[in-house]
Structure formats: structure tokens, C-alpha cells
Image (cartoon, rainbow, N blue to C red):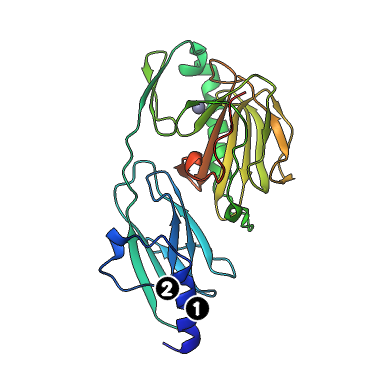
Amino acid sequence: MNRRFFLRCSLAFASTPIFSKSVFAAEPPVCFSITGAMEQGSLALGQAPPGSLVALDGRPLDVTKDGRFVFGFAYNQTTPSQIAVRYPEGGGDSRSFTPAKRQYDIQRIDGLPQNTVTPPKDVQERIAQESATIYLARFTNTPGTDFLSGFDWPAPGIESGVFGSQRIDNGTPMSPHMGVDMAAPTGTPIHAPADGIVTVSADHYVNGGFTLIAHGQGVATSYLHQSKRLVKEGDAVKRGQMIGHIGRTGRATGPHLHWEMNWFQVKLDPALATKKPKPDSL
Ligand SMILES: [Zn+2]
């Protein structure tokens, strides 16, 4: 190892409080770091020496010029994610990271419009098309690194639904709730939590007024049930910019923002990626 590499390695290592004692105590220091909540459904930020190549479970990840990269742990992931890094001067390291297991709630919701819980046949094709639009948009790998600045809460409100809970809607078991719900009156402004590019803005049957914002390297956030959308596909939005209004469109019993975060198709808990305390309710 030459001196320059050693210095870089030390710098990278020194800036990473994340190497937790339990996992790494017995292992030699490595020259890359991963930070984040390190729980199921959390976003993980990586730092490697500039010029490194990085792979997650054998597949290459995008790495910024200064060595930053990102990935996500699935909400039900129990197996490790393996990160392998090849350093620019040669050599490399590989480590496995297993997210901490979470305990998810069961939430019963009654009073939903029944045609949104068991949609009539004639709208099923529309719903499938809207899901496909979102699915494809979440493959978008915009070049920016807006996710590196962290995320603000996009709206005030009472947190009326948490990530990962098993939902029983009008008595029908549904897939787990993959977002955070913030209940607030219709018309309450929603602000972009970070800079990004709008990749979908449309009125959907189940999602209601829907907006998807890409923040770089597959990290995206979405906003559901809006009464009004203020941005359109292709718009570049700035942190704090008003992007829409809270509403109760689509599958909703009352006005609230359903806020989601993804890393490509991996659904993440936005509450684990916000950098400020949760705002007060109105
Ligand atoms: Zn929700």
C-alpha cells in the first residue's frame, strides 16, 4: 500500500463512525464506509476512496467522482447485502451488512371507498397501467446526487400511518403499508424534501394525485392522494419548493399525504432518511 493510498484510506475510515463495534471489532479496518440507520427499509450511504469501483451483491453500483454511492435494505430483508470495493490503486475489500430486524404493526383501516379496495373490473386495466408507469419510472437513474444532502419532512401533520405495517383495509388484508402517512387538512402545502427531477405527475385511480421525484442514483420519493399537483414531469425541483397540496384523492379515508421513498424498486422508510425532527402537526 503506498502512502497516498494509506492516507486516503485513513481519511475515509476516520470519517466513518458507522463501523460498529459488534460487527467489525475483530476485523481489520477497511477503506470504505457505510452510514445510515442500518435497519430493514433504510437507505445506506457509502463512501469509498475516489476512483473506486463498487459492487452490491456482485452488481456494479454508480459511484460519484468523490467516491459516494447508495443502496437500500428491503423492508423484510434478513440476508446480508455484500459490498465489494476495488480501490483505484489496486486491492480491495468486501464486507457484508445485515440490516437490523424491525417489528412492524398491524393497522386496520375501515371506511375506505370500497371501489378502491376491491376495484371494479373496468378500472383494473387502468390501475395496472398506472402501476407499470411508476414501476418503470423507478428504474430511472438520474445522474444527480441530490440524495446526499438528506431529506426534510415534506409536510406537517399527524403521523397517521407508519412504514411496514400490515394493512387490513375494510376487512381485506392488503400488502404492507410502504410509506409514511401525514394527516393534515386538504390544501396543506407539500414541499420537496430535497432537490430532484419530477419523473411522474398524474392523477391515478388508487394513488390519487401522484408525483414521483428522482434524487439521483435510483433514490426517489413519491407523494400520493394530493388534491392539487403543482409540478410536472421533467421539472427540476428545489428543496423546499411547494410541489402540491395534501388531499384525499384515491384510496384514502381522509386528507393525508402518503409519502414513499425508494431505491430503484426497493421500498424504503422515509422516516429513517429525514435529517430534521418531525414537524409539529397543524
Ligand atoms: Zn399511506
Residue located at (72% from left, 35% from top): 242
Answer with left or right where residue 22 lies relative to residue 86.
left
In the rendered structure, find residue 31 and report the number of the disc placed on it: 2
Work out how far the residue at label 1 is from the one at label 2, CA to CA, in angstroms.
8 Å
For the question of whether residue 87 can be seen, the reply is: no
Query: Which sits earlier in the primary sequence, circle 1 or circle 2?
Result: 1
Residue found at x 29% / y 47%: 78
Q: Are marks 1 and 2 in contact (CB under 8 Å)?
A: yes
Callout 1, which amino acid?
Arg
> Considering only vertical position in the picture, is 174 above or below 199?
above
Residue 137 appearing in the image: yes
Say which element carries label 2.
Answer: loop
Name the spot of residue 130 as percent of width and height, x first.
57, 32
Which numbered dot is residue 8?
Answer: 1
Q: Which mark is residue 103?
A: none
Q: How many marks?
A: 2
Quadrant occupied by the N terminus: bottom left
- Residue 2, image quadrant: bottom left
Neighbour tally class for label 1: few under 14, some 14-19, many 20 plus, Cα within 10 Å: some
The residue located at (45%, 77%) in the rendering is: 9
Task: Give the image location of residue 124, x and y in percent.
Answer: 51, 23
